Every structure is written in structure tokens, then in C-alpha cells.
């Protein structure tokens, strides 16, 4: 059976064809998915690589603006005969296509995915087709009918499929397209690989008819013992009372949702043991609506700023961090297993880190959960990177959606303390409007955490660097990326730089570093050697130690990672080499240099 034509054919024969009805929007995001019953659709999927997109457009009929006719059902069975899923190749899901097949390494365009599965309906249950992420644009079809579309490569989305599923055999088809555009978020230009595909797990999540779709259970800002939050119930009985409980703390609150199923709650908990790095205490949390129980494991802590200080549970903390890309050691592709997340985070812990910057996009959910379990603070970011199309309302809507989905997915993770709205964005009034609106959006969605962004230095005179980006007034913590000794000056010159700020706010050096090919040795003055990279680090430490308002750093970067902007033969070979470890996990000298520096910092701080 030729399934690709089949989705169109089934449309023609039974359910309405895709073109005849508008694609329904994705359903509001289900949260806490790892703790819900689900049927996994991971594993091998059939795929068709479709660079001309002829599975989607046809050129035979009345041409539209671009000469193609979109979403048109085939006229007869002879159309699309070349598209045969039954004999096609397979790719693993979750996973990027680039590192699974050599011929797809540089591929950017459309790949069709198809999975057949058996499903048995349980009366009284609802089903949601949940995608952890698909880079970058996904069009989703179930049994020949279009469910909807999603844009953005790093955030989850789901569709309710309770009535679209059939008893017995079903199939899902997804058109995934990672073509880059100037108006995307990120844009067509970034310093990481454009890994395409169904990069995170796909699941059929089951819920009761009425269920707790989302809950926000956090310590009230500034309070050591008052829990405050809300519950969102979905379904016909959504107005029945809900309870929120921490059985281990013998605490419970009750609330009655409004007609939309939304309820707020608050209450003081006696003797709450707060989460912190080195003490990653998590509590079992249960939210009940009738027979449905939403269960999660949550660490509770407070996070605030006072002047130049970052206060964790009321105490000033220095963030000993490292920036991380979500790439798997050894394969160099997207992370696909919790073990890979763990490997990256354990390396961070070996460096004596208490914090990780998960750059430059929302990492997979297991990564954030693992950080909470291990006791690492998290900076989480959306891919508003470099030169975004600031004046385009659709671009803003896209960025805002990615931000909302990142926060919705992880708003109960005690580990997350910083939401970042952007990385290295050139100054302009439209950019300031765009990013300050995003910062306001963060505060509206989550008043408990801090807002940050990775900024740059724009004023540098006579060896003095001034933190004065006007975006700073909208942030709680100011991140600065600064590459002294690599993109500017020699390593030795860094120790002489002086820093000042126009803000009474904490500053974190969100990036610094330099490239080294692991195993390449030479004098400390020779670029690309491990010695040079170590000199960059050591001299930056001298600089950092003299910045009075600095409250942490997250050098660039834990591990070498693929980047199409880095072709230098024999050295980069399409890798950014600023890793402290090679892409195969071999440590460079600078790893030990940072480890020793953080050990000193840890001993000074006493925690
Ligand atoms: C930066 C970017 C990061 C790059 C890095 C570099 O400032 O934020 O994405 O990979 O510099 O290596 O140039």
C-alpha cells in the first residue's frame, strides 16, 4: 500500500480532505507527561526524503503564486505512486536524521515520517498524540486526516485524537521540514547544527475524561514556607473540587475551580526542607480532581536578587556553571536517551558546577528533570539568537509561543531559576521592544523565577568594559558573553580589563572560552592548542575575580559540537571546538583548569 498517497486517498474516500477544512490548532499543552500513562510510538519509523516536496505540492493543476498547488488531493490512484512507505527506509525516533544516515548529514528540507500502530480504546479515556519536539515545522496526519501543524524545533505539542483513533490499526504521518528561513526563531544563521526530524519522543498519552492538565506548585516568591499556585482541570467535570497535597510534609490544600477548570490555591507548609545544589530534596506532589491524580516530584526553593546578589533560599550564591548544547556524547547528534543527559550533567558536576546554562533552546524534558534530581540549577533559554526579524509580528508571536511552551513544560522544576529571553542580540529600538515584551511575558507566566538574557558589551574604552545594554533594565540577572583572548585581545590582556555596570543587578558571565582541538599541543601562544585554550581560561579567571558585581559564570562550552559555520580542515571539520571535552568525551586541559577554579570558589563559599 502506498501510504503517502493513502493519507490523501483516505481523505478523499472517508474523512474530509485536508484542504477542505482548516487544520485545527494543537490542543493546550499537557504537562507532566513523563508521569502519565502512555503508549510509546518511539522506535523505527518509515521515512521518505522529499527535497522537491512533491508529496505535498502538485504542479499539474492551476498554479498558485509559487507555481505549486498545495494540499490538493490526488485525482486518481496513479498520482504519487512513487511515494511508497512500505518499501522505504527507516529512521529511529527520537532522533535527528543528520547523524543517522550519512547522506542526510547536511540535508535541509522535508522528510515524511510514518508509523503504524495498534490501538485499543478504553471506554471513558481520552487520547493525545504528543510530540516532544520536531525540528522545525511539522504537519501531522492521523489515518489520513490532518490533525494540525507546529512550528519551532524545541518545544512539545499535542493533539487530542480520542475520536480520530480507530480500534485496531492506525497510522501517523508527519511532514517534518527543517528548511531555514530569515523569519524563523532561530533565523537562518546560528552556530549549531540544524538537526532535523522527530528529535524527541512521540507518545499516545492517555487521560481520564476529566483530568488535571496542568498545575503550578511552587513556593511563593520570597516565602520560605508558603506554597502558592494554580491547577488547570480539563473535561466535563472540571469544576469539581481539587486537592493539592505533599504527603511527606503532611500538607494539603483544597480549591474549587471556576467554570474553565482553573483554581488557585495557597497555604503554609510546616518544616519544608528546601531544595539546593548539594541537597536536591524533592517532594512527592499529588493534585487530585475526582479519581484523577497528577503526581510529580518537585524541589522547592526560593530565588531572588538583592542588589548585585542572587539569593537562593535567602543566601547569596555564586553560580559555578557551564554552558551545554543538547548534543549526545559519541553520536554528536541530538540527545535521545536520559543516559546521555546524565552523562553531560555528571561532567558538569565533576567540574564542581552548581549550575548549568542549557543553551540556546529548550533542552529535552528529561535533562531538566535530571538536573533537579542531581542538584544543578538551570538557566533555560529560547532560540532568540543573534539577528532576529524584530519588527515582524509573526516572528514575535512565534518567539512568545516558544517561551510560553518552555515555561509551561518546566514551570514546576525547582532546578530552573533563570528564564532567558535571548542570546547576543544587536542593539536597536525594535529589538528592545521585542525582548522587553518577552521579559514581561515571562513575569506574567511565572512570577517566581528570574528573567535573564545573554547580552554583550557595547561600551569599551581604555581597558574598561561597561555593562549598559538598555535591555538590562528589564532583566533580573544580566548575562554577558565576552570572548577575551579569543575574539578580542590576547589571553594575557584579559587580566588587565576592568568592568563596571550601570545596573544595581547581578551579572553572570554567560560565555567565555576559546577553541582547542583535543590532543593538539604546542605553546600557549598558539591558537587551537589545548595550551592556548587553557591560557584563555586562566586569564579569564583573573579577570572574573576582579569584577565586584559578578555572581557566576558559564563558560562556553562543555563539549565540542557540530556547527556548519566551522569548516576549518583538520581542526574544526564542522565542529565548534570550544568544548572542554571532545565530541567523544575526551577531556582537554582546560577541563581540569575550570575544575580547579571552581573547587577554589566552592571552598571560598563554603557550599
Ligand atoms: C557565542 C554564541 C555561541 C557560539 C560562540 C562561539 O557568543 O552565543 O552560540 O557558539 O559564541 O563559539 O563563537
Image: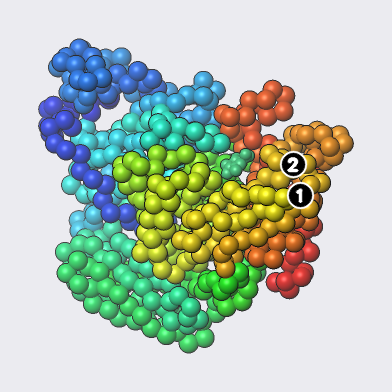
Q: Could you say which disc has been placed on residue 494 in the image?
A: 1
Query: How far apart are the alpha carbons under marks 1 and 2?
Result: 7 Å
- Residue at the (75%, 65%) spot, across then down: 601
Reply above or below: 112 against 122.
Answer: above
* 558 vs 128, nearest the viewer: 558
Tally of numbered discs: 2
Q: Could you say which disc has been placed on residue 466 in the image?
A: none
- Residue at the (87%, 36%) spot, across then down: 523
Residue 127 seen in this snapshot: no
The colour scheme of the drawn protein is rainbow
- Residue 234 in the figure: left or right of residue 13: right
Q: Can you tell me which quadrant of the image ligand 1 is in?
A: top right
Query: Dividing the image into 4 quarters, which one contains the C terminus?
Result: bottom right
For mark 1, does the 10 Å Cα neighbourhood hold few (<14), some (14 to 19), or many (20 or more) residues?
A: many
Q: Where is residue 495 in the image (x, y as percent from the top left)?
A: 78, 53
Q: Where is residue 452 in the image (x, y as percent from the top left)?
A: 51, 58
- Residue 67 in the figure: left or right of residue 131: left
For mark 2, does the 10 Å Cα neighbourhood hold few (<14), some (14 to 19), or many (20 or more) residues?
A: few
Q: Residue furthest front?
A: 462
Give residue 489's quadrant in the image. Answer: top right
Helix, strand or loop status at disc 2: loop
Asked whether disc 1 touches disc 2, contact meaning CB atoms under 8 Å apart, the reply is yes
Reply above or below: 268 against 345.
Answer: below
Q: Could you say which disc has been placed on residue 489 in the image?
A: 2
- Residue at the (25%, 40%) spot, across then down: 148
* 545 vs 132, nearest the viewer: 545
Which circle's residue, 1 or 2, is located before the other in the chain?
A: 2
* 50 vs 422, nearest the viewer: 422
Q: Where is residue 155 in the image (x, y as percent from the top left)?
A: 40, 47
- Residue at the (12%, 32%) spot, across then down: 20
Helix, strand or loop status at disc 1: helix
Amino acid at each position: 500500500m502506498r501510504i503517502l498517497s493513502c493519507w490523501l486517498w483516505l481523505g478523499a474516500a472517508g474523512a474530509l480532505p485536508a484542504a477542505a477544512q482548516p487544520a485545527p490548532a494543537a490542543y493546550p499543552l499537557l504537562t507532566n507527561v513523563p508521569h502519565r500513562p502512555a503508549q510509546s510510538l518511539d522506535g523505527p519509523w518509515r521515512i521518505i526524503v522529499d527535497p522537491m516536496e512533491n508529496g505535498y505540492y502538485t504542479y499539474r493543476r492551476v498554479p498558485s503564486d509559487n507555481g505549486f498547488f498545495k494540499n490538493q488531493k490526488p485525482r486518481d490512484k496513479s498520482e504519487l505512486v512513487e511515494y511508497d512507505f512500505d518499501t522505504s527506509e527507516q529512521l529511529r525516533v527520537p532522533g535527528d536524521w543528520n547523524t543517522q544516515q550519512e547522506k542526510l548529514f547536511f540535508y535541509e528540507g522535508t522528510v515524511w515520517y510514518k508509523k503504524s500502530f495498534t490501538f485499543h480504546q478504553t471506554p471513558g479515556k481520552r487520547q493525545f498524540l504528543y510530540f516532544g519536539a520536531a525540528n522545525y515545522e511539522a504537519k501531522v496526519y492521523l489515518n489520513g486526516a490532518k490533525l494540525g501543524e507546529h512550528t519551532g524545533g524545541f518545544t512539545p505539542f499535542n493533539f487530542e485524537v480520542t475520536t480520530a483513533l480507530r480500534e485496531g490499526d492506525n497510522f501517523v504521518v508527519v511532514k517534518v521540514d527543517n528548511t531555514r528561513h530569515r523569519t524563523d526563531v532561530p533565523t537562518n544563521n546560528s552556530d549549531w547544527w540544524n538537526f532535523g526530524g522527530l528529535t524527541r519522543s512521540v507518545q499516545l498519552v492517555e487521560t481520564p475524561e476529566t483530568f488535571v492538565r496542568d498545575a503550578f506548585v511552587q513556593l511563593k516568591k520570597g516565602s520560605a514556607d508558603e506554597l502558592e499556585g494554580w491547577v488547570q482541570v480539563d473535561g466535563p467535570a472540571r469544576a469539581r473540587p481539587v486537592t493539592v497535597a505533599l504527603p511527606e510534609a503532611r500538607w494539603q490544600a483544597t480549591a474549587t475551580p471556576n467554570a474553565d477548570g482553573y483554581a488557585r490555591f495557597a497555604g503554609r507548609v510546616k518544616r519544608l526542607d528546601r531544595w539546593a545544589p548539594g541537597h536536591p530534596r524533592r517532594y512527592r506532589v499529588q493534585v487530585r480532581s475526582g479519581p484523577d491524580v497528577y503526581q510529580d516530584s518537585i524541589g522547592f526553593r526560593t530565588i531572588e536578587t538583592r542588589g548585585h546578589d542572587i539569593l537562593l533560599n535567602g543566601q547569596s550564591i555564586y553560580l559555578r556553571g557551564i554552558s551545554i548544547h543538547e548534543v549526545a556524547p559519541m553520536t554528536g547528534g541530538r540527545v535521545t536517551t536520559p543516559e546521555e543527559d546524565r552523562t553531560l550533567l555528571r561532567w558538569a558536576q565533576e567540574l564542581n558546577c552548581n549550575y548549568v546554562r542549557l543553551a540556546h533552546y529548550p533542552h529535552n524534558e528529561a535533562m531538566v528533570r535530571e538536573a533537579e534530581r542531581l542538584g544543578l540549577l538551570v538557566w533555560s533559554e529560547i532560540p532568540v539568537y543573534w539577528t532576529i526579524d524584530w519588527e515582524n509580528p509573526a516572528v514575535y508571536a512565534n518567539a512568545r509561543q516558544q517561551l510560553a511552551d518552555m515555561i509551561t513544560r518546566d514551570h514546576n522544576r525547582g532546578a530552573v531559576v533563570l528564564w532567558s529571553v535571548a542570546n547576543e542580540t544587536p542593539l536597536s529600538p525594535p529589538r528592545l521592544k521585542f525582548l522587553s515584551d518577552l521579559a514581561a511575558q515571562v513575569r506574567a507566566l511565572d512570577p517566581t523565577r528570574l528573567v535573564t538574557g545573554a547580552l554583550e558589551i557595547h561600551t569599551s574604552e581604555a581597558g574598561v568594559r561597561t555593562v549598559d545594554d538598555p535591555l538590562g533594565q528589564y532583566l533580573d540577572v544580566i548575562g554577558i558573553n565576552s570572548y577575551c583572548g579569543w575574539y578580542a585581545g590576547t589571553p594575557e590582556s584579559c587580566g588587565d580589563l576592568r568592568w563596571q555596570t550601570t545596573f544595581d543587578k547581578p551579572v553572570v558571565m554567560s560565555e567565555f572560552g576559546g577553541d582547542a582541538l583535543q590532543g593538539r599541543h604546542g605553546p600557549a601562544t598558539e591558537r587551537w592548542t589545548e595550551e592556548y585554550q587553557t591560557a584563555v581560561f586562566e586569564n579569564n579567571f583573573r579577570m572574573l575575580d576582579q569584577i565586584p558585581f559578578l555572581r557566576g559564570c558559564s563558560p562556553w562550552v562543555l563539549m565540542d559540537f557540530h556547527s556548519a559555520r566551522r569548516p576549518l580542515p583538520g581542526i574544526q571539520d564542522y565542529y565548534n571546538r570550544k568544548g572542554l571535552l571532545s565530541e567523544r568525551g575526551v577531556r582537554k586541559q582546560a577541563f581540569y583548569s575550570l575544575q580547579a577554579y571552581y573547587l577554589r570558589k566552592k571552598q571560598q563559599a563554603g557550599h
